[in-house]
Image (spheres, rainbow, N blue to C red):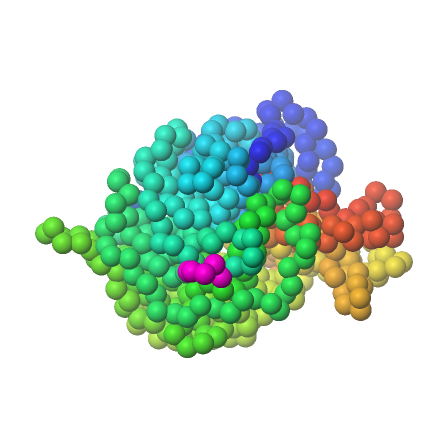
Amino acid sequence: MGQILFIAATLATTAIVGVASAQPVTGSFDTGSLGAGSVETDTTLPYAETGWVTNHGDPGNRKLQPGVTPAAEYARWTALEGAATLTTPTLLPNGNIAVTTGKAEGNANLHILDRFGDTVWTSPAWNGKVGVDSAAIMSSPIIDIDGNIYITDADQFWSYTSDGDLRWVLDLPAAPTPNPFAAGSRAINPFITAVFTKDGAVLGTTTFGQVVVADRATGELRAPILQLPGQLAKRHTKTPMSPSMWSDGIMDPAIQDPIFQILLGGIVQSANTPAVDEKTGRVFVAATDTETDKGALYGLDVTPPRGGQPGSVDIAFSTQMGPGSGSSPVLSPDAQLVYTCDDEGLLYAFDTSTGRLVWSAPSNAAAAAVSVDQQGTIYTLTNPGVASAFNTVGEKLWDADLSAVTSAALPVNDVYGAPIVRGNGNPTVVNGAVLIEVFYGYDVPVQGHPVSIPVKSAIVELDPATGVARRDVASATDTTEGLLAVMPDGRMFSTLGSMTSTAVAPLAPMVNANLPEGLEVLRPQGGLDGFLPIR
């Protein structure tokens, strides 16, 4: 996130990382389809009509791109090496992409890239409150109909034009005092990702539960800040943070503990992207409840200013869930239900009008948002495992079966045994397939406990009817730990969070000595992988 090293693809490239075999291939890009793209929308929300304009794709967080069928082959470029990325890039009307990083002072953290991964412009290198700081790594930029960009960092909300001109900046509410994070950490309070409201404003929920509504044109507040009533979550200690995680400058050391806690729902009140009902304008936020160790789903109604009076944000309902601040809410195709998961893996379906619990189902869902297809089938990232599917009434349809692709990816090892596969990102639904990021590797015994060590990283295509993996669609260059963005023109972007690869890096010399020639533990790299369909 910051000091940028681009390895960009060009139209003349002939040695290109390919699909399942990861061998060089040749082909031609369908350059006519590599523009901004468009999708049909039934919305008055002022998002750009580019098909992927927020962290989870659309205002309902569905991670759905039904007009795209996976290509037989892809060319890959990698950009922003040396900087972890955790939230998805978003698409501007001119076809460029916006993505954030989390590098230390002296570096830029908002990057605009062209379709081949070359830099177009960056925000100024940050210093103090000048420039987008490292906490922007937790926030996807959102894009409005005019191509303007909205992004938060640790303590400010920024808007830029698509050409890089600063439009306005707004100070965010402060994080609690004293600093709840580890000694030496920054006290950060970003939005995970902002949303647009039905009246054309821009809204965000900070990690400490303040709901901020700003004028899209000026950045001025349109309503008093609403403090959600939930309690602060406890520090996450179940999963220890590896001393080597996000090391060697791949992330600003001062935000590593805050980011780790936010990702795992510790300390904060809300660690998710809100969903917005495009017809009613209701905003859905998963956060903590007023009862200790419980989460809640909040339905928020936004009233715009009228007659010289400020607007308001009102809590329409609050429905208790299990522990944690939950996952990002996801709307069903008809927006009658909203889905989320708690930190114990329970999947919930709530009525969007009343907040009433319609059903719940044990799912082993990881702390990540679900995806929904056009028929209402729900897909979850699961841990352990890779993915599961549920129907519209909460009945499990399948657990993913990646046995064949795992055996094809790696051999049985004399020391570590059979290869393993781990889900490493949220599922994304496309035409006739569910795409999910995984890594292949081995479970290595360390002090009596198995540690999953990544050797290969890939995007896998699952059969949506059975959950059986059909093939590796493309190979990634690092562990992903994020979201797979699929554009209407078929381009794909995979965040390289480097969370796993950096955490296990000290074990690499020992493990590499026991791997077959030509195989090694994935090296931490960070950055963003872009995949261009080859026609």
Q: Which part of the image, by quadrant, shows the C terminus?
A: top right
Residue at 58% across, 33% down:
4
Would residue 456 be found to the left or right of residue 297 on screen? Answer: right
Q: Quadrant of residue 36?
A: top left
Q: Is residue 453 above or below residue 38?
A: below
Residue found at the far top of this picture: 12
- Percent across and percent down for residue 55 are 46, 49
Residue at left offset 28%, top offset 43%:
219
Disc count in the image? 0
- Which part of the image, by quadrant, shows the N terminus? top right
Q: Is residue 26 magenta?
A: no
Please indicate, yes or no, whether residue 146 appears anywhere in the rendered image: yes
Q: Is residue 394 visible?
A: no
Residue visible at 50% across and 35% down in the picture? 108
- Of residues 521 and 242, the one nearer the viewer is 242
> Is 526 placed above or below 445 here?
above
Q: Which sits in the foreground, 114 or 375?
A: 114
**Residue at the spot 55% in from the left edge and 41% down from the top edge:** 104
Prevalent SS, magenta region: loop
Residue 267 locus on image (x, y percent): 49, 64
Residue 241, x across and y down, in percent: 64, 59
> Where is residue 21 shown, x and y percent of the image?
73, 42
Q: Is residue 180 above or below residue 479?
A: below
Taking the image as shown, residue 255 lies to the left or right of residue 444, namely left
Most extreme residue toward the left is 307
Residue 177, magenta (yes or no):
yes
Does 283 sit left or right of 273 as displayed? left
Among all residues in the image, which is located at the extreme right?
A: 414
Give the magenta range.
176-180
